[in-house]
């Protein structure tokens, strides 16, 4: 500090004036892009939806698996297949369990929203999420559940007893868990562009990656449309494959 005051003393400046000259200048920072105050809220909502999807697939996919194995063990499926095509039977089972699962998840989410509104005393700032993001989350919840539940049903056809069901679906469960952490690390984290795009277009990870990218506004429209098309093709192919396994 003494070395800074020596030139000021030589110029016969007052200490206050010298301090003012040495003080950092004030400046105003302005971003070229408009600030989005709700981006963190949308990111959090997408992460919650990803966790709910993971839990729903693990829970209700197991219901599909158990239902397939029980039909085989009780030989009821032989009677049903005399009137119904295998893939139609499996699709109906997935549709019924899927609607039940979606209704239960909707009840849980609705109860949480009602509880939040009832306990809000004005100190909780609940940002607007937007109907578009809610629709996208719902769409990919349905697509992801349809894809993985069909895969559970196909693998359930390989098991003859309920005790063998878990071992038959072990690889699929490992893929589901690996895809979940892959998306959480790359898309929600700081993954490279090509890895994030791969997670977006790959049907195994798209149900978790697309909503996450859309929530923060990083999903181009063409990638979103292509991801839906590829997912529908994958679901159709999985239903055809599961029908053959059923047969």
Image: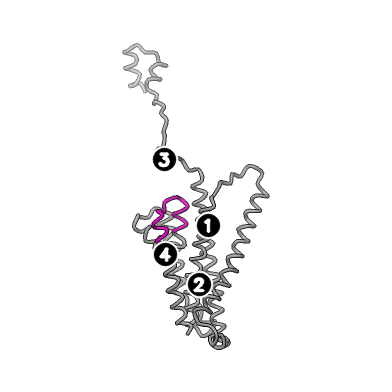
- Residue 48, image x, y percentages: 53, 57
Q: Image point 67% across, 49% down: which residue?
A: 119
- Specify which label sits upstream in the sequence, 3 or 4: 3
Rate crowding at label 4 as few (under 14), some (14 to 19) or many (20 or more) other CA atoms within 10 Å: some
- Residue 153, image x, y percentages: 50, 77
Residue 62 higher or lower than 186, as above or below:
below
- Specify which label sits upstream in the sequence, 4 or 1: 1
- Specify which label sits upstream in the sequence, 2 or 4: 2
In which quadrant of the rendered view does residue 219 lie? bottom left
In three-dimensional space, the C-alpha distance between marks 3 and 2, rounded to whole angstroms, equals 42 Å
> Could you say whether the residue bearing mark 4 is in a helix, strand or loop?
helix
In three-dimensional space, the C-alpha distance between marks 2 and 4, rounded to whole angstroms, equals 18 Å
- Specify which label sits upstream in the sequence, 3 or 2: 3
Residue that numbered label 1 is attached to: 135
Q: Main secondary structure of the magenta part?
A: helix
- Specify which label sits upstream in the sequence, 2 or 1: 1
Residue that numbered label 4 is attached to: 229
Residue 98 higher or lower than 125, as above or below:
below
From the image, state whether disc 2 or disc 1 is nearer to you. Answer: 1
Residue 72 higher or lower than 54, as above or below:
below
From the image, state whether disc 2 or disc 4 is nearer to you. Answer: 4
In three-dimensional space, the C-alpha distance between marks 2 and 1, rounded to whole angstroms, equals 21 Å
In which quadrant of the rendered view does residue 234 lie? bottom left
Mark 2 vs 4: CB contact within 8 A:
no
From the image, state whether disc 1 or disc 3 is nearer to you. Answer: 1
Q: Image point 42% across, 16% down: which residue?
A: 16
Mark on residue 33? 3
> Could you say whether the residue bearing mark 2 is in a helix, strand or loop?
helix
Q: Nearer the viewer, residue 214 or 124?
A: 214
Seen as rendered, the residue at the extreme top is 12
Query: Which residues, given as a range, are shown in magenta?
Result: 210-226
Residue that numbered label 2 is attached to: 149
């Amino acid at each position: 500090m003494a070395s800074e005051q020596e030139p000021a003393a030589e110029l016969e400046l007052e200490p206050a004036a010298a301090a003012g000259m040495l003080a950092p200048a004030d400046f105003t920072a302005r971003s070229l892009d408009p600030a989005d105050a709700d981006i963190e809220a949308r990111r959090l909502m997408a992460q919650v939806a990803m966790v709910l999807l993971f839990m729903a697939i693990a829970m209700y996919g197991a219901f599909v698996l158990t239902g397939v194995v029980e039909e085989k063990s009780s030989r009821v499926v032989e009677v049903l297949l005399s009137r119904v095509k295998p893939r139609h039977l499996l699709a109906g089972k997935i549709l019924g369990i899927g609607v039940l699962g979606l209704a239960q998840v909707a009840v849980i989410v609705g109860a949480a929203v009602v509880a939040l509104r009832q306990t809000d005393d004005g100190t909780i700032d609940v940002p607007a999420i937007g109907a578009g993001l809610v629709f996208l989350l719902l769409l990919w919840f349905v697509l992801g559940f349809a894809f993985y539940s069909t895969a559970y049903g196909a693998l359930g056809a390989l098991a003859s007893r309920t005790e063998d069901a878990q071992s038959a679906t072990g690889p699929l469960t490992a893929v589901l868990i690996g895809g979940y952490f892959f998306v959480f690390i790359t898309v929600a984290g700081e993954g490279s562009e090509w890895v994030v795009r791969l997670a977006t277009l790959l049907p195994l990870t798209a149900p978790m990656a697309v909503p996450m990218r859309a929530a923060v506004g990083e999903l181009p429209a063409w990638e979103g449309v292509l991801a839906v098309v590829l997912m529908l093709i994958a679901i159709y192919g999985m239903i055809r494959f599961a029908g053959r396994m059923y047969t």
